[in-house]
Amino acid sequence: MNYTDQLKRDIKLNGTPKRIISLVPSQTELLVDLGLEASIVGVTKFCIHPKHLRISKAVVGGTKQINLKKIKDLNPDLILCNKEENTKEIIEELEGVAPIHISDIFNLEDCFELIRMYGEICGVETKASELTTTIQAERVEFQLHQKNNEEIKVAYFIWKKPWMVAASDNFINIMLSEAGFTNAFKNQKRYPEIELDNSNLAEADIIFLSSEPFPFKEEHVLEFIQKFPTKKVKIVDGEMFSWYGSRLLKAYEYFKTLNV
């Protein structure tokens, strides 16, 4: 059986995969929500949804470092990776161990394509279609009831020491737009390092401090408020802005709670 991944790489499988290793937390969650938990044999230490997976399944490392021997011993039929979250070195290590499917997510259409791909590869096309339909309905409902029509600029921090923000050319930027905000750093690329006297930051109405990858806390909110007393500062759930797949089921309801 021949398939392609989101990098247009050819993937050859002998049949429906029954032993899957996922090296991407959001994709692990997607597998479970597609009813494929029984087919998962290996996950990363960051695969925290659902929580019990790291107990019931083998943990084969992280997203940047893996235990190659443990992966080989699990004898997988398929390994799921992502272009941004996993390194080129990891992909090269895994070549020859099992077929590798690599996702490449920039927007919602890429998310829906990935769900469809998993549905086709794993024989759960109906479940995948239902999941996509539900997410799209949530999206439409949110857009219809979106009360915020004015442009509100947001600076979305992902790291401290150095300070780093999400700019354009990434999924976070797409989800900020989905939530009804304008990225104050939309004219820059990827995840730039900045100083707190940055002119784009000065133009932001709101500062979002993401819960991941850097675990911003209330103490950081107070620091920002002291430095920027006229701006709103809020910790936001990073999973809602950066996890794709079935996490999108919860994203739009979460966006309603931001109250900005």
Image: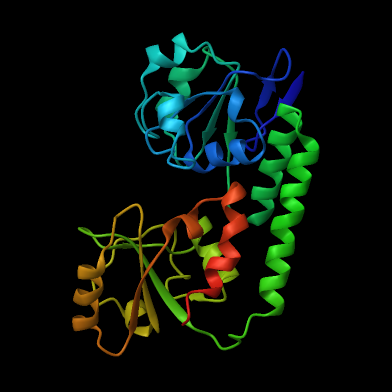
- Judge whether 11 appears above or below 258 on screen: above
Query: Is 248 on the left-hand or right-hand side of 182?
Result: right
Q: Is residue 107 visible?
A: no
- Residue placed furthest toward the right: 126
Q: Nearer the viewer, residue 131 or 51?
A: 51
Q: Nearer the viewer, residue 195 or 45?
A: 45
Residue 78, percent across and down? 59, 21
Please identify the quarter of the rendering in which residue 39 is found.
top right
Please tell me which residue is depicted at 39% across the width and 39% down the height of the picture.
46
Please tell me which residue is depicted at 40% across the width and 34% down the height of the picture.
63
Q: Nearer the viewer, residue 240 or 173?
A: 240
Please identify the quarter of the rendering in which residue 44 is found.
top left
Q: How many marks?
A: 0
Please tell me which residue is depicted at 56% across the width and 61% down the height of the picture.
251
Please tell me which residue is depicted at 76% across the width and 28% down the height of the picture.
123
- Judge whether 60 appears above or below 148 on screen: above
Q: Is residue 88 visible?
A: yes
Residue 105, percent across and down? 58, 47
- Judge whether 167 appears above or below 248 on screen: below
Query: Is 72 on the left-hand or right-hand side of 175?
Result: left
Q: Quadrant of the N terminus?
A: top right
Residue 31, percent across and down? 61, 36
Colour style of the rendered protein structure: rainbow
